[in-house]
Amino acid sequence: MEKNVKEDFFAVTPEILELTGLCKSHSTIDPALFAKYDVKRGLRDINGKGVLTGLTEISEIISSREIDGKSVPCEGELYYRGINIEHIVRGFIAENRFGFEETTYLLLFGELPDTARLEEFKKLLSKYRTLPTNFVRDIIMKAPSFDMMNTLARSVLTLYAYDERPNDTSLPNVLRQCLEMIALFPQLAVYGYQAYAHDMDRNNSFFIHAPKPELSVAENILYMLRIDNKYTALEARILDLALVLHAEHGGGNNSSFTTHVVASSGTDAYSVIAAALSSLKGPKHGGANIKVMKMFEDMKQNIDDWEDEDKVADYLSRLLNKDAFDRAGLIYGMGHAVYSLSDPRANIFKKFVKSLSEEKGLTKEYKLYSLVERLAPEVIGRERKTYKGVSANIDFYSGFVYHMLGLPPELFTPVFAMARIAGWSAHLMEEQINVGKIIRPAYKSISSHRDYVPLYNR
């Protein structure tokens, strides 16, 4: 009896299907009405440009420049607190340092730290890499989830219960909470994955490695994830670079905007970050690199010669015509909502991808990625009449990099979150410091008024 009740509880029954039909019939809006009332769907105008909804000092995306009164596409640029991301990366790479901690400091506090401040900040993060007593046993191991983003969000909301001042939204306390989450995200995600993997296969050893204070965030991720704790210098450097490139991307992306919206209500920091995590979990936002990986796996199975340009171009054409892979009509990893000519993050990233592919013996796969990156804009230009320019985005290479690093797909999006928690924290505090008003956009009702009908007359 109990089994049948449980099966029925999770089943989509005929009753649910009938109610779904009602929901759909009374909630479907004629697309023409959006144009009639000049509603910016997705908060974008007809050209895809985002509607201005706020001001920020945290980061800036440049994809076009004004020339003779016209907006002209340009090579993409990304700035953290006014500093070009290419210069930030060049700086710590040239000095053979890890850059994520420095980048996090810059995003949170608006300036680059000197050597003493950077070391103090690293020690502060290390101090907060301590989970509450029995948190792993009572929270992470008790209900392992196959989705690590779910695990992260649940863990963040549970940290609220362990905090002695969870509802204190004063800036010092919110900063303290943000630093704790920045420090703890790698543990929460990695431990969550270990619990899930062990739950799925009891033959898998369940191991928990505590982070080491002397290691960088990137090093600790690899150290905690691998049973032997071993990793190469190149692996750690490239993971650190991935964290830097994903740490922030303007205030208009879905999860950062979510951060501003939820923070404006005056709620606690844990609820704000849990909402941002829920946004990032969506396949249209943080899960795109997994789609790229799956697309390439299908490509490799359906193309017998990965160096044959005609065969690769034909596969890409079939993708666009909904005749290959998931038949969605998309070449995943190509194109971006803002960038057109280039995504600066992808340009930086791919310079290091080749080195890692050589270390891992995957140069053949790297050549295929490079070929697709070159051919895709040509194929899209031929197949899509409204073509205005498209290029590889950061997701195009990140999934391949994570695969080469031995990260399980379940951790691809959580790694994004481990980085973006820095940007979210900056946006959370910026919202609290500046606005003081709840964000409340307008929605126009298009339903006609009607009379209430008593139950006995329906």
Image (tube, rainbow, N blue to C red):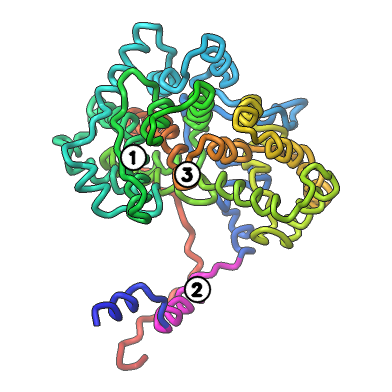
Q: Nearer the viewer, residue 316 or 208?
A: 208
**In this rendering, position of residue 91 left or right of residue 131:** right
Q: Earlier in the sequence, mark 2 or mark 3?
A: 2
Identify the element where label 2 is drawn. Answer: helix
Q: Main secondary structure of the magenta part?
A: helix
Q: Is residue 408 above or below residue 182?
A: below
Q: Label 2 amino acid?
A: Lys
Q: Residue furthest front?
A: 203
Farthest residue in the bottom direction? 456
Nearer the observer: mark 1 or 3; the answer is 3
Q: Can see residue 349?
A: no
Q: Position of residue 358 (x, y in %)?
A: 65, 28
- The C terminus is located in which quarter? bottom left
Give the alpha-carbon distance from disc 1 to disc 3, as whole Å.
Answer: 32 Å
Crowd around label 1: few <14 · some 14–19 · many ≥20 (10 Å)? many
- Give the magenta range: 14-30
Left or right for 318, reference 337? right
Q: Mark 3 and mark 2 in contact (Cβ < 8 Å)?
A: no
Residue 16 located within the stretch drawn in magenta: yes
Asked if one can make out residue 303 in the rendered structure from this viewpoint, the answer is yes
**Residue identified by numbered label 1:** 263
Mark drawn on residue 44: none
Q: Give the image location of residue 39, x and y in percent.
A: 57, 54
Q: Compare marks 1 and 3 and give the one earlier in the sequence.
A: 1
Within 10 angstroms of label 2, few (less than 14), some, or many (20 or more) residues?
few
In the picture of the structure, the residue carrying the numbered disc 2 is: 24
- Sequence-first disc among 2 and 1: 2
Residue underneath mark 3: 408
